Image: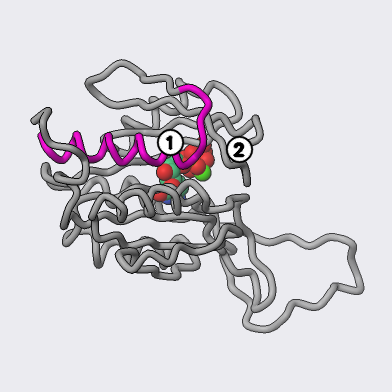
Protein backbone atom coordinates (compact mmCIF):
# COMPACT_ATOMS: atom_id res chain seq x y z
CA UNK A 1 0.00 0.00 0.00
CA UNK A 2 2.59 2.53 -1.16
CA UNK A 3 -0.05 5.18 -1.76
CA UNK A 4 -1.03 5.39 1.91
CA UNK A 5 0.83 7.94 3.98
CA UNK A 6 1.42 7.45 7.69
CA UNK A 7 -1.45 9.80 8.59
CA UNK A 8 -3.90 7.60 6.62
CA UNK A 9 -2.66 4.49 8.38
CA UNK A 10 -2.39 5.85 11.91
CA UNK A 11 -5.62 7.80 12.06
CA UNK A 12 -7.67 6.23 14.86
CA UNK A 13 -4.98 3.66 15.68
CA UNK A 14 -4.11 3.24 19.34
CA UNK A 15 -0.45 3.36 20.30
CA UNK A 16 1.19 3.06 23.71
CA UNK A 17 4.56 4.66 24.38
CA UNK A 18 6.56 4.33 27.60
CA UNK A 19 9.12 6.99 28.47
CA UNK A 20 11.58 7.94 31.17
CA UNK A 21 13.11 5.89 33.92
CA UNK A 22 11.18 3.77 36.38
CA UNK A 23 11.43 4.66 40.06
CA UNK A 24 12.11 1.78 42.41
CA UNK A 25 11.48 3.07 45.90
CA UNK A 26 13.84 2.26 48.75
CA UNK A 27 11.90 4.28 51.33
CA UNK A 28 9.53 7.29 51.12
CA UNK A 29 12.35 9.65 50.11
CA UNK A 30 14.79 7.51 48.11
CA UNK A 31 14.78 5.39 45.01
CA UNK A 32 16.99 3.71 42.47
CA UNK A 33 16.54 4.38 38.80
CA UNK A 34 18.14 4.87 35.42
CA UNK A 35 19.32 8.02 33.72
CA UNK A 36 16.69 9.03 31.20
CA UNK A 37 15.26 12.36 30.11
CA UNK A 38 12.22 10.76 28.50
CA UNK A 39 12.80 12.88 25.36
CA UNK A 40 12.85 10.00 22.89
CA UNK A 41 9.59 8.45 24.11
CA UNK A 42 7.86 11.82 24.32
CA UNK A 43 8.97 12.68 20.76
CA UNK A 44 7.52 9.37 19.52
CA UNK A 45 4.25 9.98 21.38
CA UNK A 46 3.99 13.46 19.90
CA UNK A 47 4.70 12.28 16.37
CA UNK A 48 2.17 9.43 16.60
CA UNK A 49 -0.47 11.84 17.91
CA UNK A 50 0.35 14.30 15.12
CA UNK A 51 -0.34 11.50 12.65
CA UNK A 52 -3.79 11.00 14.14
CA UNK A 53 -3.14 8.13 16.55
CA UNK A 54 -4.69 7.96 19.99
CA UNK A 55 -1.66 7.74 22.25
CA UNK A 56 -1.27 6.45 25.79
CA UNK A 57 1.99 7.72 27.28
CA UNK A 58 3.22 5.86 30.36
CA UNK A 59 5.85 7.88 32.14
CA UNK A 60 8.11 7.17 35.04
CA UNK A 61 10.73 9.69 36.00
CA UNK A 62 11.36 12.27 33.28
CA UNK A 63 13.25 15.54 33.15
CA UNK A 64 11.76 16.68 29.83
CA UNK A 65 8.42 18.52 29.79
CA UNK A 66 5.25 16.45 29.39
CA UNK A 67 3.40 16.89 26.09
CA UNK A 68 0.10 18.77 26.07
CA UNK A 69 -1.40 17.26 22.90
CA UNK A 70 -5.05 16.36 23.64
CA UNK A 71 -4.58 13.06 21.77
CA UNK A 72 -1.95 11.93 24.28
CA UNK A 73 -3.30 10.43 27.48
CA UNK A 74 -0.67 10.43 30.21
CA UNK A 75 -0.37 7.77 32.89
CA UNK A 76 2.14 8.08 35.71
CA UNK A 77 3.52 4.64 36.38
CA UNK A 78 6.34 4.77 38.87
CA UNK A 79 7.88 1.34 39.24
CA UNK A 80 8.49 -1.31 36.60
CA UNK A 81 5.88 -3.51 38.25
CA UNK A 82 3.30 -0.69 38.04
CA UNK A 83 4.19 -0.06 34.40
CA UNK A 84 3.75 -3.75 33.58
CA UNK A 85 0.39 -3.93 35.36
CA UNK A 86 -0.92 -0.93 33.41
CA UNK A 87 0.31 -2.41 30.12
CA UNK A 88 -1.28 -5.77 30.83
CA UNK A 89 -4.55 -3.90 31.32
CA UNK A 90 -4.41 -1.72 28.18
CA UNK A 91 -2.24 -3.51 25.59
CA UNK A 92 -5.02 -5.80 24.28
CA UNK A 93 -7.05 -2.71 23.27
CA UNK A 94 -4.10 -1.12 21.46
CA UNK A 95 -2.40 -1.56 18.08
CA UNK A 96 1.14 -1.02 19.20
CA UNK A 97 3.64 -0.52 22.00
CA UNK A 98 6.91 1.38 21.94
CA UNK A 99 9.03 0.58 25.02
CA UNK A 100 11.27 3.64 25.16
CA UNK A 101 11.31 3.63 28.98
CA UNK A 102 14.56 3.01 30.81
CA UNK A 103 13.26 0.28 33.07
CA UNK A 104 15.30 -0.37 36.20
CA UNK A 105 16.46 -3.99 36.09
CA UNK A 106 16.05 -4.41 39.86
CA UNK A 107 13.97 -3.09 42.73
CA UNK A 108 14.83 -3.09 46.43
CA UNK A 109 13.67 -6.41 47.82
CA UNK A 110 12.09 -4.74 50.78
CA UNK A 111 10.46 -1.33 50.79
CA UNK A 112 10.98 0.48 54.10
CA UNK A 113 7.91 2.55 54.97
CA UNK A 114 9.79 5.21 56.95
CA UNK A 115 12.90 7.25 56.15
CA UNK A 116 15.94 5.06 56.77
CA UNK A 117 18.24 6.80 59.26
CA UNK A 118 22.00 6.76 58.93
CA UNK A 119 23.49 3.84 60.76
CA UNK A 120 25.74 5.21 63.51
CA UNK A 121 27.60 1.92 63.88
CA UNK A 122 28.79 1.38 60.31
CA UNK A 123 29.96 3.29 57.22
CA UNK A 124 28.27 0.76 54.96
CA UNK A 125 24.72 0.14 53.88
CA UNK A 126 23.60 -2.89 51.91
CA UNK A 127 20.36 -2.90 49.98
CA UNK A 128 19.27 -6.21 48.59
CA UNK A 129 17.83 -6.01 45.08
CA UNK A 130 15.45 -8.33 43.28
CA UNK A 131 15.02 -8.54 39.50
CA UNK A 132 12.13 -6.70 37.87
CA UNK A 133 9.89 -8.43 35.36
CA UNK A 134 10.93 -7.94 31.73
CA UNK A 135 8.04 -5.75 30.61
CA UNK A 136 8.83 -5.82 26.89
CA UNK A 137 9.21 -9.58 26.82
CA UNK A 138 6.09 -10.22 28.91
CA UNK A 139 3.91 -7.98 26.75
CA UNK A 140 5.41 -8.99 23.38
CA UNK A 141 4.66 -12.64 24.21
CA UNK A 142 0.95 -11.76 24.23
CA UNK A 143 1.16 -9.86 20.93
CA UNK A 144 -1.40 -10.65 18.21
CA UNK A 145 -0.37 -10.56 14.55
CA UNK A 146 -2.20 -7.25 14.11
CA UNK A 147 -0.17 -5.60 16.86
CA UNK A 148 3.37 -4.22 16.79
CA UNK A 149 5.95 -4.02 19.57
CA UNK A 150 9.07 -1.89 19.34
CA UNK A 151 11.84 -2.12 21.91
CA UNK A 152 15.07 -0.27 22.49
CA UNK A 153 18.51 -1.55 23.33
CA UNK A 154 20.84 0.71 25.26
CA UNK A 155 24.41 -0.54 25.07
CA UNK A 156 27.87 0.78 25.84
CA UNK A 157 29.67 -2.03 23.96
CA UNK A 158 29.01 -4.81 21.42
CA UNK A 159 25.96 -2.84 20.31
CA UNK A 160 24.67 -5.00 17.46
CA UNK A 161 25.35 -8.41 19.06
CA UNK A 162 23.57 -7.38 22.25
CA UNK A 163 20.72 -5.71 20.38
CA UNK A 164 20.23 -8.77 18.20
CA UNK A 165 20.01 -10.99 21.28
CA UNK A 166 17.31 -8.67 22.66
CA UNK A 167 15.35 -8.80 19.39
CA UNK A 168 15.23 -12.59 19.64
CA UNK A 169 14.74 -12.99 23.36
CA UNK A 170 12.06 -10.35 23.76
CA UNK A 171 9.95 -11.18 20.66
CA UNK A 172 9.94 -7.55 19.53
CA UNK A 173 9.16 -6.67 15.91
CA UNK A 174 11.86 -4.01 15.95
CA UNK A 175 14.72 -3.06 18.23
CA UNK A 176 16.09 0.47 18.14
CA UNK A 177 19.75 0.01 19.07
CA UNK A 178 21.39 2.89 20.77
CA UNK A 179 25.04 3.40 21.75
CA UNK A 180 24.83 5.06 25.17
CA UNK A 181 28.60 5.35 25.62
CA UNK A 182 28.20 8.58 23.64
CA UNK A 183 26.22 11.63 24.73
CA UNK A 184 22.67 10.34 24.46
CA UNK A 185 21.16 11.13 27.84
CA UNK A 186 19.46 14.51 27.76
CA UNK A 187 20.71 15.14 24.23
CA UNK A 188 18.43 16.30 21.42
CA UNK A 189 20.19 14.07 18.91
CA UNK A 190 20.64 10.35 18.52
CA UNK A 191 22.25 7.83 16.17
CA UNK A 192 20.43 4.50 16.10
CA UNK A 193 20.38 1.24 14.18
CA UNK A 194 17.09 -0.56 13.51
CA UNK A 195 17.04 -4.34 13.84
CA UNK A 196 14.19 -6.57 12.73
CA UNK A 197 13.76 -10.29 12.10
CA UNK A 198 13.51 -10.41 8.35
CA UNK A 199 15.47 -7.37 7.35
CA UNK A 200 19.04 -6.20 7.21
CA UNK A 201 20.12 -3.84 9.97
CA UNK A 202 19.27 -0.30 9.07
CA UNK A 203 21.90 2.18 10.26
CA UNK A 204 20.37 5.61 10.55
CA UNK A 205 22.72 8.63 10.59
CA UNK A 206 22.97 11.03 13.53
CA UNK A 207 19.79 13.10 13.58
CA UNK A 208 17.53 14.91 16.01
CA UNK A 209 15.39 12.77 18.32
CA UNK A 210 12.40 14.39 16.64
CA UNK A 211 13.56 13.04 13.27
CA UNK A 212 14.26 9.60 14.80
CA UNK A 213 10.73 9.68 16.22
CA UNK A 214 9.27 10.51 12.80
CA UNK A 215 11.11 7.59 11.23
CA UNK A 216 10.09 5.17 14.00
CA UNK A 217 6.44 6.20 13.57
CA UNK A 218 6.83 5.66 9.81
CA UNK A 219 8.16 2.15 10.54
CA UNK A 220 5.13 1.46 12.74
CA UNK A 221 2.74 2.71 10.05
CA UNK A 222 4.43 0.58 7.38
CA UNK A 223 4.23 -2.49 9.63
CA UNK A 224 0.57 -1.96 10.57
CA UNK A 225 -0.48 -1.64 6.95
CA UNK A 226 0.85 -5.09 6.03
N1 LIG B 1 12.94 -3.51 29.31
C1 LIG B 1 11.75 -3.95 29.87
N2 LIG B 1 11.73 -4.47 31.14
C2 LIG B 1 12.86 -4.58 31.85
C3 LIG B 1 14.09 -4.16 31.28
C4 LIG B 1 14.09 -3.62 30.00
O1 LIG B 1 10.71 -3.86 29.22
N3 LIG B 1 12.81 -5.10 33.06
C5 LIG B 1 12.91 -3.00 27.93
C6 LIG B 1 13.42 -1.58 27.74
O2 LIG B 1 12.36 -0.64 27.84
C7 LIG B 1 13.97 -1.64 26.31
C8 LIG B 1 14.46 -3.06 26.18
O3 LIG B 1 13.76 -3.82 27.17
O4 LIG B 1 12.95 -1.41 25.35
C9 LIG B 1 15.93 -3.26 26.35
O5 LIG B 1 16.36 -2.68 27.58
P1 LIG B 1 17.87 -2.86 28.03
O6 LIG B 1 18.06 -2.26 29.35
O7 LIG B 1 18.76 -2.43 26.89
O8 LIG B 1 17.98 -4.47 28.08
P2 LIG B 1 17.89 -5.53 29.26
O9 LIG B 1 17.10 -6.67 28.74
O10 LIG B 1 17.43 -4.92 30.53
O11 LIG B 1 19.39 -6.05 29.40
P3 LIG B 1 20.69 -5.33 30.03
O12 LIG B 1 20.26 -4.08 30.76
O13 LIG B 1 21.29 -6.36 30.89
O14 LIG B 1 21.55 -4.99 28.82
CA1 LIG C 1 18.36 -3.07 31.47
Colouring scheme, one of rainbow, by chain, secondary structure, one colour: one colour
Residue nearest the observer in this picture, 36 or 127: 36
Q: Quarter-wise, where is residue 163 in the image?
A: top left
In the rendered view, does 180 fall on the left or right side of 170?
right
Within 8 Å of ligand 1, the CB of disc 1? no
Tag 1 secondary structure: helix
| Magenta stretch: includes residue 207 | yes
Q: Is residue 63 left or right of residue 9?
A: right
Observer-nearest residue: 3 or 199?
3
In-front residue for pair 142/64: 64
- The mark found on residue 184 in the picture is 2
Disc 2 Cβ-to-ligand 1 distance below 8 Å: no
The image quadrant where one finds the C terminus is: top left
| Residue labelled with disc 1 | 212
Q: Is-magenta flag for residue 57? A: no
- Magenta range is 205-226
Q: Earlier in the sequence, mark 1 or mark 2?
A: 2
Main secondary structure found in the magenta portion: helix
**CA distance separating discs 1 and 2:** 13 Å
Look at 52% across and 53% down and name the residue there: 38
Amino acid sequence: ADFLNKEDILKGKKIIVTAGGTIEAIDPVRYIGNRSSGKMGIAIAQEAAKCGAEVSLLVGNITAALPTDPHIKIYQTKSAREMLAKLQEIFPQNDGLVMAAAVADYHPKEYVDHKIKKNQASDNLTIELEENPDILKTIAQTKRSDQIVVGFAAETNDLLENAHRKLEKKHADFIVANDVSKNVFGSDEDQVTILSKNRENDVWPLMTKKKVAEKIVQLIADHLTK
